[in-house]
Amino acid sequence: MDENAYLTSIIASLFYLIAGSRLLRLSRRTRERPELLLGLYFALSGIYYLGYNLPSLLGDLVPEWVGVVVEWTYILGVFPYLLFTRSVFRSRGAWGGWIVGLCSALLVAGTLMLTLDGSVEYSLDNPWYLAQWVGYTTPCAWMCWEAMLYWRSAGKRSRIGLCPPIVANRYLLLALFAGFQVLACLSDLLLAHEVGDDQTVSRITDALIGGTEMASIALLWLAFFAPRSYASWITRRAVILPTPMDG
Amino acid sequence: MATTLFDIAAERLEASTDLDRLAVRGTLRLALKEAGLDPQNLNVAQLRAVFEKLMPRELEARGVAKPAAICSAVMNDVMSAARTADLEVSSSPDEIFKRLGGS
């Protein structure tokens, strides 16, 4: 991977840690589960990205077992992400539970078998890698879909004053964030496909990784640390219906 | 027997207008759809906004006289019924996403 791609990954990891700790602090104050779950996801993702880039920064100083721990850290982070999507968007339907169960099974089985194999082989020929890939890509695609659906209906609720425009916009930002995560997952597949020294594939993968990470940071910044100017711009653009009832 | 806010509102509306059960529920569903709301996950504030801003127009389009006054009366009924039945929805995705931004 190119050095610039590592750099964006490290910046992203720091940002995930900041966003995660902010949400965890919020959950301590509100004692509510959704912010705890999302906070855990971001915090563990931040730790994963930092750990993932350690070998490129420190070389042989990093023992091999660190890679395994880092891998499991990410997998642990996907569970709260799945539970967040389920509890916020699909708390009533049974099929949401099925997605959580299926993804969790694929993640645990895939990662466990990769760990037991000893060599973490990211190859399209390895069924356990593919199981793990489906296990961590599906939650991102699911979140993207649900948040996009809610963004559409939140726009309608905004028109009658039920949903603040900045909240409706937050659905869109998180949907786009999850969409970029799906792109990042697809770039993982490209990396796994990159068996030889194909420079073109390598450049595409690096650009995808770097681009998706930078876009993700921007989207999370607007979602969780929106500057006042952005919030008022979004509010100004929103159309709110007047009340036709006057007694 | 009415179990959700949607059911209570539809019952009260049916009693206050000449519309039949099917027409009332259909009209209410259309207004909720326009408001981006799910009939099964409604809270009182959401229903009130629909009855204030969308339902008068929908009822007028179906030939109901004095729709605004009817909506207001039905909503008052629904609110007192909801209080006794404790039908408030606890935490909607909108409330959660509002908290996430710290707003």
Image (tube, rainbow, N blue to C red):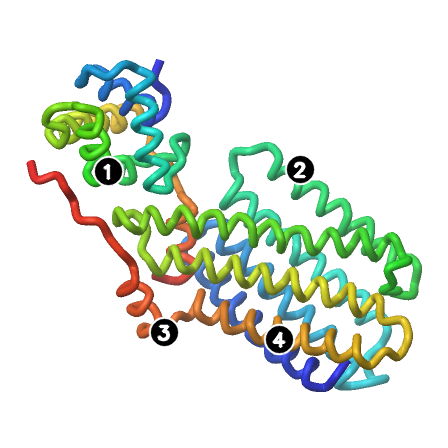
Alpha carbon separation for disc pair 1 and 4: 43 Å
**Residue A130 placement (x, y as % from top left):** 82, 54
Label for residue A211?
A: 4
Of circles 4 and 3, the one toward us is 4
Kindly check if marks 3 and 2 are in contact, taking CB atoms under 8 A apart as contact.
no
Residue placed furthest toward the left: A247
Q: Secondary structure at mark 3?
A: loop
Q: How many marks?
A: 4
Q: Earlier in the sequence, mark 3 or mark 2?
A: 2
Alpha carbon separation for disc pair 1 and 3: 33 Å
Alpha carbon separation for disc pair 4 and 3: 23 Å
Question: Along the horizontal axis of the image, is A126 left or right of B61?
Answer: right
Quarter occupied by the N terminus of chain B: top left
Amino acid type, residue under disc 2 in the picture: Trp
Of circles 2 and 4, the one toward us is 4
Of circles 1 and 3, the one toward us is 1
Q: Quadrant of residue A183?
A: bottom right
Kindly check if marks 4 and 3 are in contact, taking CB atoms under 8 A apart as contact.
no
The subunit letter for the residue under badge 2 reads: A
**Residue B89 placement (x, y as % from top left):** 37, 36
Kindly check if marks 2 and 1 are in contact, taking CB atoms under 8 A apart as contact.
no
Label for residue B70?
A: none
Q: Secondary structure at mark 1?
A: loop
| Nearer to the camera, A237 or A117 | A237
Label for residue B54?
A: 1
Q: Secondary structure at mark 2?
A: helix
Q: Earlier in the sequence, mark 2 or mark 4?
A: 2
Q: Which residue is mark 2?
A: A98
Q: Which residue is mark 3?
A: A227
Question: Along the horizontal axis of the image, is A142 left or right of A109?
Answer: left
